[in-house]
Amino acid sequence: MVFWKRLFSSDTIAAPVPTQFEGDFVEFFDEGANQSRFFFSTDREIDLYELEELCDSVGWARRPIRKVKKALEFSFLVVSMWEVKGNRRYLIGFARATSDHAFNATVWDVVIHPRFQSKGFGKALLKYLIRKLRNEDISNITLFADPQVVDFYRRLGFVLDPEGIKGMFWYPD
Amino acid sequence: MVFWKRLFSSDTIAAPVPTQFEGDFVEFFDEGANQSRFFFSTDREIDLYELEELCDSVGWARRPIRKVKKALEFSFLVVSMWEVKGNRRYLIGFARATSDHAFNATVWDVVIHPRFQSKGFGKALLKYLIRKLRNEDISNITLFADPQVVDFYRRLGFVLDPEGIKGMFWYPD
């Protein structure tokens, strides 16, 4: 069972955070058997090959590293989730959002390593991301949900087709 | 009847464009009775009060100018549509898109002045915007459509809920 301590109380670093991990780290705890420690970060300097590995683990199609790098650079918010074991950290979750920095944000590329799925990690990641966007005064947080995760997002407060507004994707002729 | 000459052939300025209007202007012609001339632009230096007037004309809720300014600054693409009469230009259409500059774009704030609705102007504006995004190698063009404009976007090649992917909006508890 995972307990989210301090998750919504502060963005400051909870001591002792390993000093070799720079960035906006927020600690939360897994009080289960494995004694791992977990962190969020909004630092966008992520090893892109480690991110690729995470995306591979959930079966996503490979994307050119060059384009992923650009996408991270121009996303409004990048959130990563790390497991810390000894002096190493492992990327176990990721999400990002594009935005006009004023009204709208759209969440993309939400991924949790299969080993950590269905344990509350995805929920914690999304809550952290939503809180970050709200702190930036973004009022309209949107996403496009695959059918199998619609209920997951619904439980987080996302509403399907509100007032009949429909998600649409452009396809070339 | 409006004819779209040169619309998809070139981004260069079609002579004679009034030199007082700077920016990336693309001329197209209205060969109807009023002899007006029309231009697209991607210049984001738009008079925000003129934009507000355009949004008023379609009954949108007022938004703080300060936030609109920021949203335009941080949009990936801003497209405006102008009617030119003598040495004055009038804003008659607008749309913008957020993006990660790599994979995804989301279209927001599509508006056509009521005087120019149902005459092909909206279609021309969206086609121009799509072409611009495609030129930037953006493969995933998305939007959230109000129920009354779903068919408009469908005719432009937008697909509703492709593969069951659903648009969702977050609402505070």
Image (tube, coloured by chain):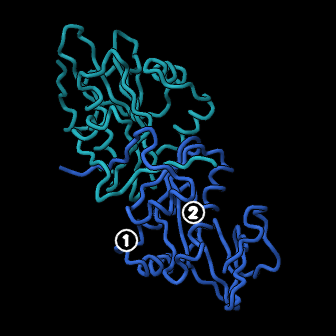
Chain colours: A cyan, B blue
**Residue at position x 56%, y 41% from top?**
B103
The quadrant in which residue B127 appears is bottom right
Q: Which mark is residue B78?
A: 2
Compare residues A28 and A108 and report the one nearer the observer. Answer: A108
Answer with mark 2 or mark 1, whichever residue precedes in sequence.
1
State whether residue A73 is above or below residue B58.
above
Q: Is residue B129 left or right of residue B148?
A: right
The quadrant in which residue B21 appears is bottom right
Judge whether residue B167 can be spotted in this image.
yes
Q: Secondary structure at mark 1?
A: loop
Indicate the position of residue B122 as horizontal and vertical percent values: 56, 69
Judge whether residue A135 can be spotted in this image.
no
CA distance separating discs 2 and 1:
18 Å
Q: Is residue A68 left or right of residue A2?
A: right
For label 1, the residue is B64
Indicate the position of residue A117 as horizontal and vertical percent values: 30, 21
* Labels 2 and 1 within one chain: yes
Compare residues B69 and B99 and report the one nearer the observer. Answer: B99
**Type of amino acid under label 2:** Val
State whether residue B158 is above or below residue B113.
above
